[in-house]
Image (cartoon, helix red, strand yellow):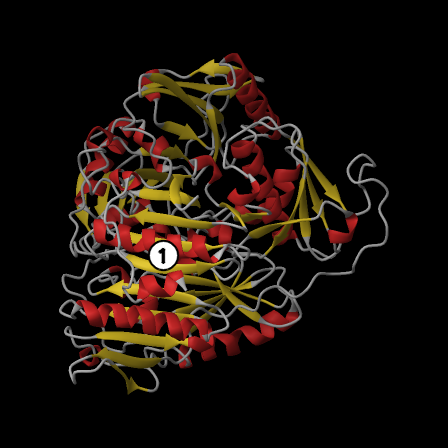
Amino acid sequence: DFEQQILEGETDIMVSHKEFATAGKKPGLQVWRIEKMDLKPVPEALHGSFYTGDAYLLLYTTAAPSYFIHMWIGEECSQDESGAAAVFAMQMDDHLGGGPVQFREVQDNESKIFIGYFKKGIKYQKGGVASGFQHVVTNDANVKRLLHVKGRRAIRATEQDLAWSSFNMGDCFIIDLGQNIYVWYGSKSNRYERLKATELAIDIRDNERRGRGTMHLIDEGEEPAETLGPKPAIAPCGSDDDKVDAGNKKKGSLYMISDASGNMKVSCVAESSPFKQAMLSPEECYIVDNGVDGSIFVWKGPKANPSERKAALSAGDAFHRMTPLPQIQVIPAGGEMTLFKQFFCDWKDKDETTGVTKPYTIGRIAKVPQIPFDAATLHTNKTMAAHHGMVDDGKGKVQIWRVEKGAKAPVDPSTYGHFYGGDCYLILYSYNLGGREKHIIYTWQGLKCTQDELTASAYLTVLLDDSMGGSPLQVRVTQGQEPPHLVSLFRGKPMIIHLGGTSSKSGHSETASTRLFHIRQSTSGATRAVEVEASSSNLNSNDVFVLKSPKVLYIWRGTGATDEEMEASKHVVGFLGGTPSQVQEGKEPADFWSALGGKKEYQTSTGLKKMVKPPRLFGCSNKTGTILVEEVPGDFTQSDLATDDVMLLDTWDQIFLWVGKDANDEERKEAPRIAKDYVNTDPSGRKGLPITTIQQGEEPSTFTGWFHAWDPKMWETDPLERIRKRF
């Protein structure tokens, strides 16, 4: 067993590879495929697409920097390729100083962290490198494949035989015929599943087809004959979705790996959690076995000898081979994540970072200074976040047009960086890479723009792309979901998003007499200023706000706000005009509250003052006939709240149950029990947390404050219907 030899240290390991030269040099995700026992990079446009006959190596780098190494093994992958992935993972770990957290991922059973990298979903494709399938970006008009889309939070699309026999009424399918992409909705699938399948199909069109595929949305029974021919009777529904639960909400066991007695021994330290942090000796290695949940954690003590570290890896491997979901995570001291630390009732980190806008760091650098987003220092300052898609430092040429009466109207460069919710914009970014000119077209669509403008923006994007020979990368951006690279184009200034209205001189730019701007710096370092309704209930202790009324102009600094957010507020004041007064939370004068219509309850959770653990969001659904709880992977947003489910938000000192308006009676009835069980079975021993149940549309500020720029009108129109109207 090649992989076992690696884990036991019986194979010589080369500690360098040409691909390691760029590994971890900047924040974001890097993906390689194992091809002929070597590493070959996967183009960024194809990240999230995996061949089932292959093995992959992934590296995610945070701004700290900290590192996550993932080995991904397809279900039809050969043992040699799997072993090669293990070799390269250990080589990369050595190359990065032994600080990374390592994961062994298996198709269909990936960790939440892994799934979180691919918010639009993961695609499994048949074949592999041995079959001649290559990862190449093409506009292949002859491609023919069928993707079966499953999942509501963790979206997986698996390639099936292109035949009606692969279909069922309960799921959604994507029929990809190259120039035409059909999204087929089973009659028994629900709106949220249809929405996710449609978003995935849009991603295929924009990335794999470079925006050239034509989308078709089809309900069962309305199929055009040219798709797959005459339709026979199909299965009523598919097999149950993968059984999922609330993450690691189960008891674990703690084992120690030691050779202190002269022989390598594995001994049980505690049969069930919660554990004490003092149980972990820095001279030893340990295994936390959460086998009932399919997770094995291997913790490497900082002073453990090499033989113990190798034995821990080997023992961890033996543990995970006996579990139903073979997930293994190798964690260095100082790199512990929430999923590991929650098994300990008294865990304390050295130099804990505070505030949810500051990065929760792992790895060798425990404390990270917060600095403003400055695109000019992107490549020289390792703490400058650049997340996914930071192709360069943002210093290239920028041209912006507003969609007006079906045509492009140039935007005054002095107003670049200002976006209005009633408008759509085209942003053309040109830059030089290796002596070649490259282009990106960002199509920004405001939440309040008209259907005609949405249609026109898509049409104008294709025209602009065609005029440039089809070479640009197209990125469609919905208001509130702007990628960091787009924000970086405005020379370090915050991206300012105005509430409703339009910037068109011929239109009606309706602005309220009293305006409130919410300023927040993300963990990636990008700063946005989003206009919200001028009410004190929208304040948040963790951020900065700018308030202007006919009588006052204030910059309000919350207790947990950063200096960079304060600096960004100056740009907001600059366009509002006037001389501001700065006010600290808790020291507000009477006219401040008066301008906001009086003092109301707002988000002041103690969790914002010392945020060690990030909040987590779960969906509670019985769409498969059984109540299941599934975590939303990655950073969650308001759009992750499924209106036909009950959602559970865990902020660590409080539990919220959010009841969607379309949730069924069983979900409503069972949700309180699930929340109680969730707390009572927490491996850290948390008990007695307050559980608040709230209805969709009646959210208090203590709930909405965990979401950036909460939009109370988001659900006035169905999100699936908004997408369908575009096609």
Q: Which one is nearer the viewer's eye here, 396 or 291?
A: 291
Circle 1 Cα neighbour tier, 10 Å, few/some/many (<14 / 14–19 / ≥20): many
Q: Residue at x 61, y 30 (%)?
A: 451
What quarter of the picture does the C terminus occupy?
A: top right
Q: Which one is nearer the viewer's eye here, 97 or 377?
A: 97
Query: What percent of the width, then of the height, locates residue 4?
Result: 37, 65
Q: Which one is nearer the viewer's eye here, 583 or 662?
A: 662
Q: Which one is nearer the viewer's eye here, 229 or 274?
A: 229
Q: Is residue 200 visible?
A: yes
Secondary structure, mark 1, is: helix
- Amino acid at dot 1: Ala
- Side of 435 relative to 508 (left or right): left
- Side of 368 relative to 144 (left or right): left
Query: What percent of the width, then of the height, locates residue 424?
Result: 50, 27
Q: Is residue 464 above or below residue 656?
A: above
Q: Is residue 515 visible?
A: no
| Picture quadrant of residue 343 | bottom left
- Side of 371 relative to 112 (left or right): left
Q: Residue at x 46, y 22 (%)?
A: 472
| Picture quadrant of residue 607 | bottom left
Label 1, on which residue? 86
Query: What percent of the width, then of the height, locates residue 652?
Result: 33, 69
- Side of 586 relative to 177 (left or right): left
Query: What percent of the width, then of the height, locates residue 195?
Result: 61, 47
